[in-house]
Image: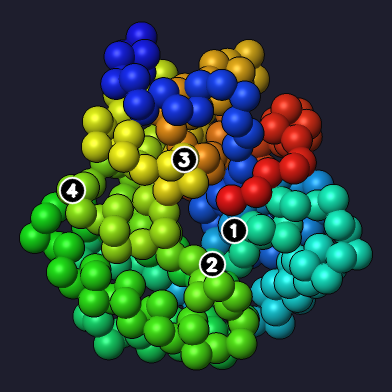
């Protein structure tokens, strides 16, 4: 398989290292109550989850989202303050990220900063997910300006510890310089039929697994082990695999739980630290 042709250094997670989840963004809590409740369940190997109300924070605080967000914040606080001392996943991860749509570099800087302030003020998020992030070298200066400002805003707030977390949602391997612009890059987002034959970019071998995330839909239950093996081999520390797909009227296969959620949680298990 092509993913096995990665350079030796890129195969740094081919051993026993564990993975954790990044959730690209569930549906509204009224439509996906089980999904939001599952994020706060002790032992879930959650690195972060994205909050997206209306392709951003919306025009005003949403009471249903506030309730779901509160449960996730409380779960993280319990771990951080020792009520669940063995739950190292939630102590190091479990962040809530606000969804900012960069529209491949077309959205004005001022709009993005206004949305980020609303997320911080209303939902006390711990970072941002920058969806549809540019991938070319020409877009890097604007993304650097944005991520620098976002880090400053998070540092000023009382909601983000350690300066917050920024994830760039490229969905493919970008120009290597983007690796220095944020905490983590999504370097694959797409169907299992593409993922199982994918190749990792050689430059990613210079970075540890916690710098990369993979989102794959249409993964059959019978291929879960293979999918996790590919993620480890390619050096991704954060994943979201689902058997849902973009067919049969499902516009966003990542908006709901995979049918094998409990199984994949048990396969990965608790005890992950970033």
- Tell which of 70 and 126 is nearer to you: 126
Foreground tag (2 vs 3): 3
Q: Secondary structure at mark 1?
A: strand
Dot 4 or dot 2, earlier in sequence: 2
- Tell which of 208 and 45 is nearer to you: 208
- Location of residue 257 by image quarter: top right
Q: Which mark is residue 209?
A: 3
| Apparent side of residue 234 relative to residue 273 in the rendered image (left or right) | left
Residue on which disc 1 sits: 49
Mark 4–mark 3 Cα distance, whole angstroms, equals: 18 Å
Q: Quadrant of the N terminus?
A: top left
Residue on which disc 2 sits: 97
Mark 2–mark 1 Cα distance, whole angstroms, equals: 6 Å
Residue on which disc 4 sits: 175
Asked if one can make out residue 221 in the rendered structure from this viewpoint, the answer is: yes
Mark 4–mark 1 Cα distance, whole angstroms, equals: 25 Å
Q: Residue 247: percent from the left, percent from the top? A: 47, 33
């Amino acid at each position: 398989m092509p993913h096995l042709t990665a350079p030796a250094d890129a195969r740094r997670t081919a051993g026993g290292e564990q993975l954790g989840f990044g959730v690209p963004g569930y549906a509204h809590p009224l439509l996906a109550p089980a999904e939001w409740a599952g994020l706060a369940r002790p032992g879930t190997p959650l690195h972060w989850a994205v909050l997206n109300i209306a392709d951003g924070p919306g025009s005003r605080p949403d009471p249903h989202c506030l309730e779901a967000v509160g449960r996730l914040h409380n779960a993280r606080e319990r771990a951080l303050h020792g009520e669940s001392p063995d739950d190292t996943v939630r102590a190091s991860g479990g962040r809530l990220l606000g969804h900012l749509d960069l529209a491949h570099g077309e959205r004005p800087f001022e709009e993005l900063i206004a949305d980020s302030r609303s997320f911080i003020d209303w939902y006390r998020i711990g970072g941002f997910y920058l969806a549809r992030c540019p991938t070319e070298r020409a877009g890097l200066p604007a993304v650097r300006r944005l991520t620098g400002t976002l880090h400053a805003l998070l540092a000023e707030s009382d909601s983000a510890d350690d300066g917050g977390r920024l994830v760039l949602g490229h969905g493919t391997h970008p120009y290597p310089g983007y690796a220095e612009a944020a905490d983590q890059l999504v370097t694959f987002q797409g169907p299992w039929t593409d993922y199982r034959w994918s190749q990792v970019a050689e430059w990613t071998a210079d970075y540890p697994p916690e710098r990369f995330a993979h989102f794959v839909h249409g993964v059959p239950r019978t291929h879960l082990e293979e999918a996790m093996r590919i993620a480890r081999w390619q050096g991704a520390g954060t994943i979201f695999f689902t058997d849902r797909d973009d067919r049969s009227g499902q516009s966003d296969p990542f908006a709901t739980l995979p049918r094998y959620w409990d199984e994949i949680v048990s396969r990965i298990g608790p005890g992950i630290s970033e």
